[in-house]
């Protein structure tokens, strides 16, 4: 087992989560290409982490602000959650859907915030894009360069309904897609205990994580 | 060399048979197609976790906290240089010309200028690693990965990756080193170094997962597939998006 769990990789997961989850809310003109969008957002986030020592030291409140202001506006978190939940999503009540998104977000943010201290001299290299100009969904492939081996970090992005902006709806680090990786765990919980059971499990996990952080 | 091969070979063969035997009792209605031996795998994971909590992890934490950083880096580099030798061979077996040449150059540069690999000079001068192993070579030539297997002590694997273990043992520099004291010391150091590099990751894993077992399994299988395709797996289509369906009122 291996490199996908190594110390540096974790920092990239973290980085990716942060990048995926947000950029500054500045919405650019419609002509921005998907790879330019990723480039802009990643650089913004990297810069704000580098500029803020308390984020690097794992200040949970500061990280929360960073995620809400810079990451979430650039992510279709509804889609991320729904596709991780799978077909059951459509049978869930709006209240259940809301709770699922809330708990899933807390889980991701809390999990990755600890790794922010690892961000130091990294830069993002965007690989050539293979997409037609009018594609609504695009795979953007990037590499995180820093000390040591480059680390693969890819994003799936979609054009918003009005065509004015891009949003990230899945990402992978070294080939491991985030949404896919939650899928069978979620299915397991739903099969055993239903949607409310899954919500309860997520909430429990978050409570344990919050206690461990103190 | 031969002796090492047959001993480890028998061990692995016995292991595979053991795993096969468990098939019969393992299938249930919710079985993951990639993981027909889940009950067995879960027990082995539990065993591995116990071993890890009591021995490996404490040792790795001690090593991380009480060994000077330059020493830790040197140790990691040394073992990475050894594995670059196998990357060279496996890049060759996959007929990847440039990667083979670069991996070979890395070994030469790091062994000579980097003093037996203690310093990673090659990365400094822009020669990057192209890690390949025997399991990936089989995958490259079309051998499917087969069911997921959790090996005692070694952790996540697949039938394909397990099948090359005897070959890996037989060709392992550390395991075949003649001086017993040095060999044992090197084995232990290699394991502790590896575990230390995974400390933060394993903490993250326990925090991120609802079910650590299936989280690890799914990540491992995706990760290996990606490695076999060198970061560019085919037909990697996006999942359907249930939230995008026209809002048909669901059956209440």
Image (cartoon, coloured by chain):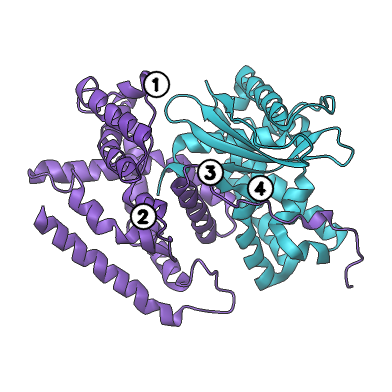
Chain colours: A cyan, B purple
Q: How many marks?
A: 4
Q: Chain of mark 1?
A: B
Query: Badges 2 and 4: C-beta atoms under 8 Å apart?
Result: no
Q: Chain of mark 4?
A: A
- Regarding residue B90, the answer to whether it shows in the image is yes
Q: Which residue is mark 2?
A: B138
Answer above or below: position of B132 versus B1: above
Residue B140 versus residue A11: which sits nearer the camera? B140
Distance (Cα) linking label 1 and label 2: 29 Å
Same chain under badges 3 and 4? The reply is no
Q: Earlier in the sequence, mark 3 or mark 2?
A: 2
Element type at marker 2?
A: helix
Give the x, y percent position of residue A209: 60, 48
Marks 3 and 1 belong to one chain: yes
Does the residue at mark 1 contact the one at mark 2 (Cβ under 8 Å)?
Answer: no
Q: Is residue A121 above or below residue A108?
A: above
**On the image, which quarter does residue B101 sit in?**
top left
The residue that mark 3 highlights is B232
- Residue A46: image x %, image y %? 63, 24
As measured in the structure, the alpha-carbon distance from the residue carrying label 3 to the one carrying label 4 is: 29 Å
Q: Can you identify the residue that label 1 sits on?
A: B126
Q: Residue at x 55, y 47 (%)?
A: A176
User: Which of marks 1 and 3 precedes in the sequence?
Assistant: 1
């Amino acid at each position: 087992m291996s490199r996908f769990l190594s110390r540096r990789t974790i920092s990239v997961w973290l980085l990716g989560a942060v990048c995926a989850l947000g950029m500054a809310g500045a919405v650019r003109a419609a002509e921005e290409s998907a790879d330019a969008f990723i480039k802009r957002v990643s650089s913004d986030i990297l810069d704000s982490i580098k500029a803020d020592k308390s984020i690097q030291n794992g200040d949970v409140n500061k990280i929360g602000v960073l995620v809400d202001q810079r990451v979430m506006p650039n992510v279709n978190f509804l889609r991320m959650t729904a596709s991780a939940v799978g077909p059951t999503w459509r049978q869930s009540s709006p209240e259940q859907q809301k709770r699922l998104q809330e708990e899933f977000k807390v889980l991701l943010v809390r999990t990755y915030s600890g790794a922010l201290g690892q961000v130091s001299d990294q830069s993002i290299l965007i690989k050539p894009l293979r997409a037609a100009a009018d594609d609504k969904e695009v795979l953007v492939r990037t590499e995180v360069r820093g000390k040591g081996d480059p680390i693969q970090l890819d994003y799936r992005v979609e054009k918003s309904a009005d065509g004015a902006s891009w949003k990230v709806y899945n990402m992978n680090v070294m080939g491991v897609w985030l949404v896919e990786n939650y899928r069978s765990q979620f299915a397991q919980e739903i099969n055993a205990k239903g949607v409310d059971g899954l919500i309860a499990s997520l909430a429990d996990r978050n409570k344990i994580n919050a206690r461990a952080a103190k | 060399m031969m002796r090492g091969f047959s001993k480890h070979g028998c061990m692995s063969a016995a292991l595979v048979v053991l795993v096969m035997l468990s098939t019969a009792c393992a299938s249930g209605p919710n079985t993951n197609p990639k993981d027909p031996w889940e009950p067995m795998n879960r027990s082995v994971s539990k065993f591995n976790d116990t071993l890890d909590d009591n021995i490996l992890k404490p040792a790795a934490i001690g090593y991380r906290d009480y060994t000077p950083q330059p020493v830790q880096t040197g140790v990691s580099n040394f073992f990475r240089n050894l594995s670059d030798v196998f990357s060279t061979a496996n890049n060759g077996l996959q007929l990847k010309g440039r990667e083979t040449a670069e991996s070979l150059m890395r070994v030469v540069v790091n062994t000579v200028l980097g003093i037996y690999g203690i310093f990673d000079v090659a990365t400094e001068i822009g020669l990057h690693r192209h890690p390949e192993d025997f399991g990936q070579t089989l995958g490259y030539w079309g051998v499917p990965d087969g069911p997921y297997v959790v090996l005692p002590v070694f952790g996540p694997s697949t039938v394909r990756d397990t099948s090359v273990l005897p070959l890996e043992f037989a060709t392992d520099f550390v395991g075949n080193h003649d001086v017993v004291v040095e060999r044992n010391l090197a084995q232990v150091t290699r394991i502790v170094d590896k575990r230390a590099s995974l400390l933060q990751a394993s903490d993250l894993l326990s925090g991120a997962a609802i079910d650590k077992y299936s989280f690890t399994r799914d990540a491992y299988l995706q990760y290996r597939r990606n490695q076999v395709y060198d970061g560019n797996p085919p037909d990697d289509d996006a999942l359907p998006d249930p939230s995008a369906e026209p809002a048909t009122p669901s059956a209440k």
